[in-house]
Image: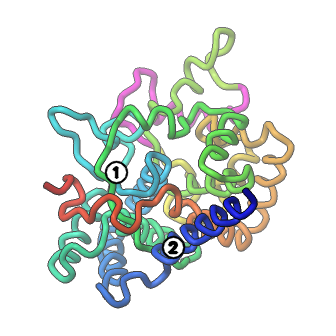
């Protein structure tokens, strides 16, 4: 029995090493050496036209990895017989930047046909978005393959909504292998981008049975939000998530939470727990440490549930499953 257990352990170690060897930095150096340059070029061109797309690409990578792992399934279009992830209420209309991935894929297919996966393009594009907007760049291990399944229904059980409290957020991230510290760190992605008013209107007009306005929300900030988001739930209205610097990866997001100006319940709730509140304060005071931790957490996120080897496929069109 001991020999059998030892053999099993050796096999598992071997498989683990195999996985790590196929997800590696510089994966395309021999097969498509210009891959990362082309992707960054497309991201740069897109952000020069619309800086807000950076947040869209970072958010898209997060929403991809938390549903079925980082397999590019969030990029797949719906069909008459299937509603895909991108068209779930959690993603539509909040996700944007799909055309950036399409443009990069078109160029890569022309240069290295059937080599670079859509999942890897998205991971690189998210990294480039972080770096261009002022965050720390980081090496992206690549070698992911693309999934062949995309179900809108799976977003509901995997993606944390803006209404989650700190305990729910902690559990949601723990389900994906993240610590509470990493959850607070990754929440800092809300320092860039915008939100539709419908994602937080309940905090302004229908918080609970006794009060209309969330008492944890700074009253002056609430007044500004009410001007920009009048009652009526217009689905097209948007506001910046971090008004002082909506297109810069900085710690203004955490400073806003301390001032009771977290836009979502899931932002402001970080002050309700002593441990997460301490982390919010530390991040607010130490931009260098937060940016470094954020880069590390993004690398870790990019390894969730990846497909490697012969699993999945390399999509020719990121929106359509091959064949």
Q: Is residue 122 magenta?
A: no
| Depth check, front residue: 162 or 7 | 7
Quarter of the view holding residue 43: bottom left
Q: How many residues crowd around disc 1 within 10 Å: few (fewer than 14), some, or many (20 or more)?
A: many
Left or right: residue 289 compared with residue 11: right
The x and y percentages for residue 246 are: 51, 57
- Residue displayed at 51% across by 73% down: 18
The x and y percentages for residue 111 are: 18, 83
Q: How many residues crowd around disc 2 within 10 Å: few (fewer than 14), some, or many (20 or more)?
A: few
The x and y percentages for residue 220 are: 66, 36
Task: Give the quadrant of the N terminus.
Answer: bottom right
| Depth check, front residue: 135 or 86 | 86
Residue range in magenta is 215-238
Number of labels in the image equals 2
Task: Give the quadrant of the C terminus.
Answer: bottom left
Circles 1 and 2: CB atoms closer than 8 Å: no
Q: Disc 2 marks which residue?
A: 18
Left or right: residue 107 compared with residue 89: left
Measure the alpha-carbon separation of dots 1 and 2. Answer: 24 Å
Q: Is residue 237 magenta?
A: yes
Q: Disc 1 marks which residue?
A: 73
- Residue displayed at 46% across by 36% down: 228
Q: What SS does tag 2 mark?
A: helix
The mark found on residue 204 in the picture is none
């Amino acid at each position: 029995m001991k020999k059998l257990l030892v053999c099993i352990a050796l096999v598992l170690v071997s498989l683990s090493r195999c996985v790590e060897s196929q997800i590696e930095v510089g994966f395309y150096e021999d097969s498509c050496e210009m891959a990362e340059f082309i992707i960054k070029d497309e991201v740069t061109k897109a952000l020069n036209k619309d800086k807000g797309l950076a947040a869209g690409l970072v958010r898209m990578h997060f929403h991809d990895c938390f549903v079925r792992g980082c397999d590019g399934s969030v990029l797949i279009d719906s069909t008459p017989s299937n509603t895909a992830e991108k068209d779930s209420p959690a993603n539509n209309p909040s996700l944007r930047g799909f055309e950036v991935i399409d443009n990069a894929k078109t160029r890569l297919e022309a240069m290295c046909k059937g080599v670079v996966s859509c999942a890897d393009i998205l991971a690189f594009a998210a990294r480039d978005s972080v770096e261009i907007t002022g965050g720390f760049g980081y090496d992206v291990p690549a070698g992911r393959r693309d999934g062949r399944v995309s179900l809108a229904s799976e977003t509901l059980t995997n993606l944390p909504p803006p209404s989650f409290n700190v305990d729910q957020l902690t559990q949601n991230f723990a389900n994906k292998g993240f610590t509470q510290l990493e959850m607070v760190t990754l929440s800092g992605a809300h320092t860039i981008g915008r939100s539709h008013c419908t994602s937080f209107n309940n905090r302004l007009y229908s918080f609970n049975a006794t009060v209309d306005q969330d008492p944890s929300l700074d009253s002056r900030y609430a007044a500004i939000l009410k001007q920009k988001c009048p009652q009526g739930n217009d689905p097209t209205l948007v506001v910046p998530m971090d008004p002082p610097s909506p297109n810069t990866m900085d710690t203004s997001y955490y400073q806003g939470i301390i001032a009771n100006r977290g836009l979502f319940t899931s932002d402001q709730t970080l002050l309700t727990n002593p441990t997460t509140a301490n982390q919010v304060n530390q991040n607010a005071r130490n931009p260098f440490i937060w940016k470094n931790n954020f880069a590390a957490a993004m690398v870790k996120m990019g390894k969730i549930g990846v497909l490697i080897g012969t699993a999945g496929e390399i999509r020719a069109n990121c929106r359509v499953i091959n064949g």
